[in-house]
Image: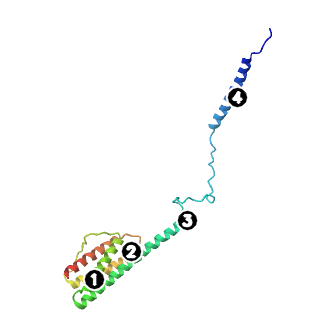
């Protein structure tokens, strides 16, 4: 009898060879995945080629943010100058009240309007300085009208000096206290009328 090659055996060799090749291929892929990464970090992106996003808060050099900052500073400076102007006007009104009282020995109706304007300005100054509505605690209130009007002028002038010398970024307790004293004295002068 002639010897015949067994076809299943030849397929078995081919299958074994294919299985071994597949095993080697999978093994090399698995070992490459376990290799250590390169210790040098990847290069940083070039900032000139990639413009920053509009939502990036660290974009300090943009023209829009510079313009916004300038406008904010300008508004704060304007607000401070208006507050100084209020303090100067309050001091002038108080001086006018002293002069009017000295001439007439009484406060007329237009002087009462000036007293109202002085109170309004003082409240605005106090509010801009960071103060709020409180009951004024005034000590040493003169009982005589002439002395009270003179004291109003003194307090208004002291308030003006405080406002002028206080930097615009400072909340001044001295300005608030002085304004509260002046408001209390204005109310007392109204009661004396």
Crowd class of label 3 (few under 14; some 14 to 19; many from 20; radius 10 Å): few
**Side of 142 relative to 61 (left or right):** left
Residue at the right extreme of this rendering: 2
Which badge, 2 or 1, is on the more N-terminal residue?
1
User: Sequence-wise, which precedes: disc 2 or disc 4?
Assistant: 4
- Alpha-carbon span between mark 2 and mark 4: 86 Å
Residue 111 versus residue 46 in the image, above or below: below
Crowding around mark 1 (Cα neighbors within 10 Å: few <14, some 14 to 19, many 20+) is few
Spot occupied by residue 68 in the image (x, y as percentages of width and height): 49, 68
Q: Nearer the viewer, residue 66 or 16?
A: 16
Among numbered discs 3 and 2, the one appearing first in the sequence? 3
Relative to 76, say whether 152 is above or below.
below
Can you tell which mark lies on residue 21? 4
C-alpha distance separating marks 2 and 1: 29 Å
The residue under label 1 is: 113
Q: Can you identify the residue that label 2 sits on?
A: 166
Q: Position of residue 25 (x, y in %)?
A: 68, 32
Name the N-terminal-most of marks 4 and 1.
Answer: 4
């Amino acid at each position: 009898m002639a010897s015949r090659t067994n076809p299943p055996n030849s397929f078995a060799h081919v299958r074994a060879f294919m299985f071994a090749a597949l095993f080697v291929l999978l093994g090399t892929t698995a070992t490459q995945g376990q290799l250590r990464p390169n210790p040098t970090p990847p290069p940083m992106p070039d900032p000139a080629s990639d413009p920053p996003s509009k939502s990036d808060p660290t974009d300090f050099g943009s023209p829009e943010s510079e313009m916004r900052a300038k406008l904010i500073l300008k508004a704060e400076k304007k607000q401070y100058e208006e507050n100084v102007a209020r303090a100067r006007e309050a001091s002038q009104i108080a001086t006018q009240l002293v002069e009017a009282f000295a001439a007439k020995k009484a406060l007329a109706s237009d002087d009462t309007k000036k007293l109202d304007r002085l109170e309004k300005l003082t409240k605005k100054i106090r509010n801009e300085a960071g103060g709020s509505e409180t009951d004024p605690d005034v000590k040493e209130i003169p009982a005589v009208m002439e002395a009270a009007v003179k004291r109003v002028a003194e307090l208004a002038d002291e308030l003006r000096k405080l406002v002028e010398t206080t930097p615009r970024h400072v909340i001044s307790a001295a300005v608030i206290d002085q304004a509260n004293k002046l408001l209390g004295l204005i109310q007392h002068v109204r009661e004396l009328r």
